[in-house]
Image (cartoon, rainbow, N blue to C red):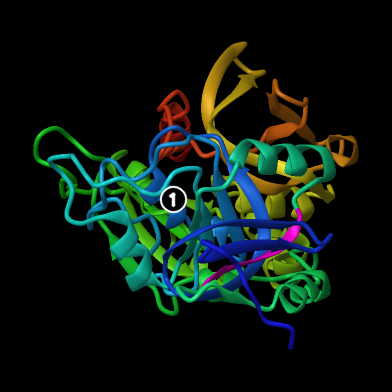
Amino acid sequence: MTTQILSGATGVLALADGTILQGVGVGAVGTALGEVVFNTAMTGYQEILTDPSYMSQILAFTFPHVGNVGVNVEDVEQIGDGSGTSARGAIFRDAPTDPANWRSGGDLDAWMKRRGVVGLAGVDTRALTKIIRDKGAPHGVIAHHPDGQFDLDALVAQAKAWTGLVGLDLAKDASTLQAFDWNEGVWEWPAGYPRVDATDKSVVVVDYGVKRNILRALASTGARITVVPATTSAEDILARNPDGVVLSNGPGDPAATGQYAVPEIKKLVASGKPLMGICLGHQMLAIALGAQTVKMEQGHHGANHPVKDLTTGKVEIVSMNHGFTVDRDSLPDAVVETHVSLFDGTNCGIAVKDKPIFSVQHHPEASPGPTDSLYLFNRFADSMKA
């Protein structure tokens, strides 16, 4: 071991190509391995860091000032304590600032320590973003040691040896272990998250790493919500006699998770029940319908992505978080493309002809992000009524 003591640096990011970025360690002490991506959102860092879709990833925030609104118990997006089932590390240009917000229940640095999230500040995030933009999302190791001692060669070797997200099923680990009901609606001023009285309509959500705000948006349509594990069979889902089924977001390779999920999704499609997919759920629905998915170079991560709804002609600004995409050229004749990214032209939505089945790549629940696409939950609710 060739331990090096870096002058003034208590944190590093080591990339698989040998690039070393030095800075000041924040959050948890230790090391974390993952795919390094950048997120362009200007707000919502707590929601981003607790999104299960970021499992096995290290997040670089392009917005330079993070931490000013602190953290609170309400803005956590994952179900459960989330230990190990969200972002592994976080990179900031400036050290997280002290909180100054009426909703704050603590500061970001201490919160990251409690959650085991390794952080690095004082990094030229513009330079890192350019690396990702030009070369694709690299494998990296983020490390924080207060004594400034790092075995840089070993960190680079660890990053180089990692096989990455392709072929990796993470949904099982991100998913709930048992079914539960949900009745919390979207946030309202000044009460917060209200309890929603359900109607006679019921929805089963298959949890591949679901965000709380997806459940809140669904509950706000008036439906009774039941969340089931990722490995639940179609027979068990249909035995609950739902009026509709939602395939949630989640981390990892859709083709890998699809090994056990796609056969069940095919049965759900054949049942004729209204079906809605989001992010990973969108990708696996596409696979079940006969399409293919591919790994993206950088992915889409941010809250300012323009997407066009081809069914209405409307352009929406949406929240995105995905590293795989549906290959539009592989869509079968029975499937129509409904949404497209105006950044790079990739597929962002599909629907099945003559069936109440559709899905989107982006996050209509936002959190963080704009609410331009919230109407999709009402569209799903209308399909159940029909």
Kindly identify the amino acid type of the residue bearing the numbered disc 1.
Asp
Q: Residue at x 26, y 52 (%)?
A: 71
Q: Give coordinates of residue 217: x percent, y percent.
A: 35, 42
The answer to whether residue 332 is left or right of residue 342 is: right
Q: Residue at x 40, y 27 (%)?
A: 371
Label total for image: 1
Q: Give coordinates of residue 320: x percent, y percent.
A: 57, 38
Secondary structure state at the residue bearing disc 1:
loop
Outermost residue toward the top in this view: 313
Instruction: Count neighbours of disc 1 (C-alpha within 10 A) and say few if under 14, some if 14 to 19, many if 20 or more.
Output: many
Q: Give coordinates of residue 119: x percent, y percent.
A: 48, 61
Question: For this rendering, which residue is in front, 174 or 185?
Answer: 174
Q: Give coordinates of residue 278: x percent, y percent.
A: 57, 46
Image quadrant where one finds the N terminus? bottom right
Outermost residue toward the front in this view: 7
The image quadrant of residue 150 is: bottom right
Q: The magenta stretch spans which residues?
A: 138-144
The residue that label 1 is drawn on is 243
Camera sees residue 81: no
The answer to whether residue 256 is left or right of residue 374 is: right
The answer to whether residue 129 is left or right of residue 164 is: left
Q: Main secondary structure of the magenta part?
A: strand
